[in-house]
Amino acid sequence: MKFFSRFPQGALSVEETQKTAIIGRADAALAARPAHITDSVAPNSAGGRHDFFSQADYAWPNPDTADGLPFVSRDGETYPGAFFDHRKAMRAMRTNVANFTAAYLFTKDPKYAKAAETWIKEFFLDKETMMNPSLLYSQAVLGVCTGRGIGIIDTLHLIDVPVAADILLENGQMDKSVYEGLKSWFAAYLNWMCTHQYGIDEMNWFNNHSVCWHVQAAAFACFTGNNDVLQMCVDHYKNAILPGQMADDGSFPKELTRTKPYGYSIFIVDNMATLCYLLSTETENLWDFTLADGRSVKKGLDYLYPYLNDKTKWPHRTDIAHHEDWPVAMSFMLFAAASYDEDKWLELYSRLSKYSENYEVRRNTAIRVPYLWLCSVIFHNS
């Protein structure tokens, strides 16, 4: 996994202020039992014990039928009775692995690295507790389908794990067999994403789902050394994602038509920036890539910034739910500061909340500990 090589010194102090909080969360997690999807039985899953399962967030029981089937859509409104235990277990694993790894870097105490390795090993590799490297049963709609390509967005939160694993290995804190086993898991999952019809459907989806598919594919391809997939992601970004989803003013019309246009606009910009971070090299800098008509990731960032800086200026409708919980500090603000040397993004990041407890915000935040994505620069400059 490569790391960004030109990060402004001002950003380092932003992450430094979070050191105590990160170590505190890591300390609290040391006493916790590692999370596995096998800890919870999904009664409506068509898969087995090791298959990840979730229900569509916005699918609700049918009010016109006795058994509530088939479920019906209520866009933007999360059904509180849906099964999300596997999703919560995955995110708990990711979050704790990220916090453990960051705490190790801050303290050099191997107990944190050991905990991260244990959580990774049990979630991905141990025969009794591992998750299968596929997503056949994610975001099912009861009475309609047992899974969907759209469900692949559920594994967006896994992109922190390869970053953590690379850091641990580089610091001599991960057993090579565990590291290689994890690479094999992600290689198998990436292959499934690229070849199964669900993955193909998601790759070609018309809104943020396609962006998130490419973010995952790029992260997992970086980790596993799959240069063919990386080049495919670059080509798709230039020829499909950017021209197909961004309007002339830098907005994303497919997100603005949703019932939560503010939250979804933040979400897609965050993932567009992460995609540019992952795919940019010295010879292929997507931060500077611009279509003939002027559209670019910077245009998307510039469009959104005024409404992050002052939400009251948002010109579109208010989100149907959780509008008051946005914005929060997110990694794309640091990436934008690095890419364009604009202090306004650092200032924005520094004054926004760094750790929301809101389920919706957490569900729509891909990178939990941005510090890890920048740590090689921080330590090389310290």
Image: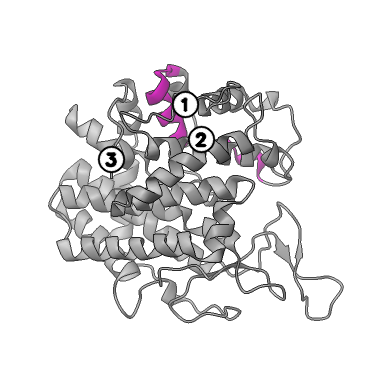
Identify residue for label 1.
Answer: 289
Q: Which mark is residue 238?
A: 2
Q: Is residue 267 left or right of residue 214?
A: right
Q: Amino acid at mark 3?
A: Lys
* Secondary structure of residue under mark 2: helix
Q: Quadrant of residue 92?
A: bottom left
Q: Mark 2 and 1 residues: CB-CB less than 8 Å, in contact?
A: yes
The stretch of residues the image draws in magenta is 322-343
Tell me the residue at 51%/66% (across/down).
Answer: 196
Tell me the residue at 38%/56% (across/down).
Answer: 94
Q: Is residue 71 magenta?
A: no
Label located before the other in sequence (2 or 1): 2
Residue mark closest to the camera, 3 vs 1: 1
Tell me the residue at 35%/28% (across/down).
Answer: 14
Q: Which mark is residue 137?
A: none
- Relative to 59, is 375 above or below? above
- Relative to 180, is 8 above or below? above
Q: Is residue 231 left or right of residue 353?
A: left
* Secondary structure of residue under mark 3: loop
